[in-house]
């Protein structure tokens, strides 16, 4: 079946050098109960207590830099830091990767003005952008490093609907693609439509998904099922689990992934083991390396 081309493709395992540039302070001890996040127009983010403000500037008391004077015309936004972002008396930067697991998505979406470049196994590439706080659109392609091989390309629209803010989110979306090739066998349509409900925050959640696939332009009779989860254990480290049951007209298989995400403000790297379980065929463990690069300037 054509979907096996994606799940069982043996990518070259590469070594990545992760360079993370920290903007302002990432983590520090907090003494005040009213801590604000101040995002400036040049992309910096500061945490602290506002000790003085007027029409021209604010004075922010920070742990690392002491008192900072920031002009109003340099500020993009100011917001009171969610108490969930204060863990054991320390502030965590906002998670820009909460809308994705390894390959699939959660019920959360990209916010307006927020974008993301996602890569898996070197060859799977996708760029997504939040056109509003509730709708994002992505486009991707996967050159399979095979001369005269197929070139899969796709788009991924996604609606994200908060049922209860930062607690329950519903996503409805799809993946619609075509594999382009000079050979008729490798020239076909593929994709899926899905609904995903996520319980929890962007930092710790469990998602249950339900959908139907598209193979050779035809809808599958059996549903696609998913159960995914994420828990952020520190500002820069998270555990992720991702599992799917996929059935087609001819055969079906399960896909299970477990691994870790190392996060910075500007880039995140996933290291995981994906295991394809194919009835009457066997179990195929494959290492997974993923890269996520957020961009844009969302209004937090």
Image (cartoon, grey):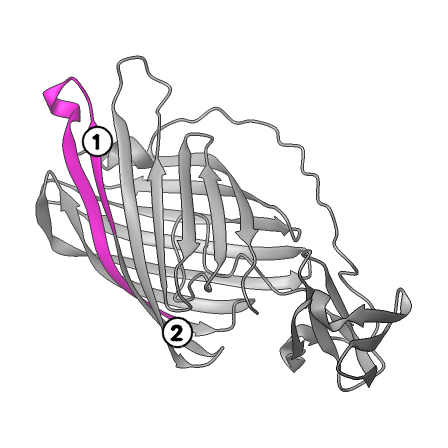
- Residue linked to disc 1: 179
Residue at the far bottom: name it.
Answer: 33
Q: Quadrant of the C terminus?
A: bottom right
Q: Which mark is residue 169?
A: 2
Residue 36 horizontal side relative to residue 113, left or right: right
At 46% from the left and 54% from the top, the residue drawn is 101
Magenta run includes residue 188: yes
Q: Main secondary structure of the magenta part?
A: strand
State the CA–CA distance, disc 1 to disc 2. Answer: 32 Å
Q: 23 above or below 89?
A: above
Mark 1, other Cα within 10 Å: few <14 / some 14–19 / many ≥20: many
At 76% from the left and 66% from the top, the residue drawn is 46
Q: Position of residue 130 (x, y in %)?
A: 42, 59
Tell me the element at label 1: strand
Q: Are marks 1 and 2 in contact (CB under 8 Å)?
A: no
Magenta run includes residue 167: no
Q: Position of residue 294 (x, y in %)?
A: 55, 50
Residue 70 horizontal side relative to residue 190, left or right: right
Residue 53: quadrant of the picture: bottom right
Query: Depth check: 63 or 29 in front?
Result: 63
At 44% from the left and 68% from the top, the residue drawn is 206
Q: What range is drawn magenta here?
A: 175-198
Query: Depth check: 49 or 82 in front?
Result: 49
Residue at the far top: name it.
Answer: 147
Residue at the far right: name it.
Answer: 66
């Amino acid at each position: 079946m054509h979907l096996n081309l994606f799940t069982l493709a043996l990518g070259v395992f590469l070594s990545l050098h992760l360079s993370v540039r920290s903007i302002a302070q990432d983590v520090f001890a907090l003494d005040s109960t009213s801590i604000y996040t101040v995002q400036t127009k040049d992309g910096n983010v500061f945490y602290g207590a506002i000790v003085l403000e007027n029409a021209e500037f604010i004075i922010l008391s920070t742990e690392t830099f002491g008192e900072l004077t920031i002009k109003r015309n340099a500020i993009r936004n100011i917001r009171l830091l969610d108490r969930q972002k204060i863990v054991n008396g320390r502030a965590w930067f906002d998670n820009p990767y909460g809308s994705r697991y390894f390959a699939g998505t959660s019920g959360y979406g990209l916010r307006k003005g927020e974008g993301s470049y996602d890569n898996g196994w070197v060859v799977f590439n996708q760029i997504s952008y939040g056109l509003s706080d509730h709708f994002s659109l992505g486009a991707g392609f996967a050159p399979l490093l095979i001369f005269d091989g197929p070139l899969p390309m796709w788009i991924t629209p996604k609606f994200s609907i908060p049922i209860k803010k930062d607690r329950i989110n519903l996503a409805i979306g799809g993946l619609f693609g075509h594999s382009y090739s000079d050979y008729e066998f490798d020239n076909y349509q593929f994709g899926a439509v899905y609904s995903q409900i996520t319980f929890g925050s962007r930092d710790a959640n469990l998602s249950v998904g339900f959908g139907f696939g598209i193979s050779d332009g035809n809808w599958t009779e059996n549903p696609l099922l998913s159960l995914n989860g994420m828990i952020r254990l520190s500002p820069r480290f998270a555990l992720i689990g991702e599992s799917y049951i996929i059935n087609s007209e001819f055969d079906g298989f399960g896909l299970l992934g477990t691994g870790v995400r190392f996060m910075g403000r500007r880039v995140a790297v996933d290291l995981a083991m994906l295991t394809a379980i194919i009835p009457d065929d066997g179990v195929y463990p494959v290492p997974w390396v993923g890269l996520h690069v957020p961009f844009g300037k969302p209004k937090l």
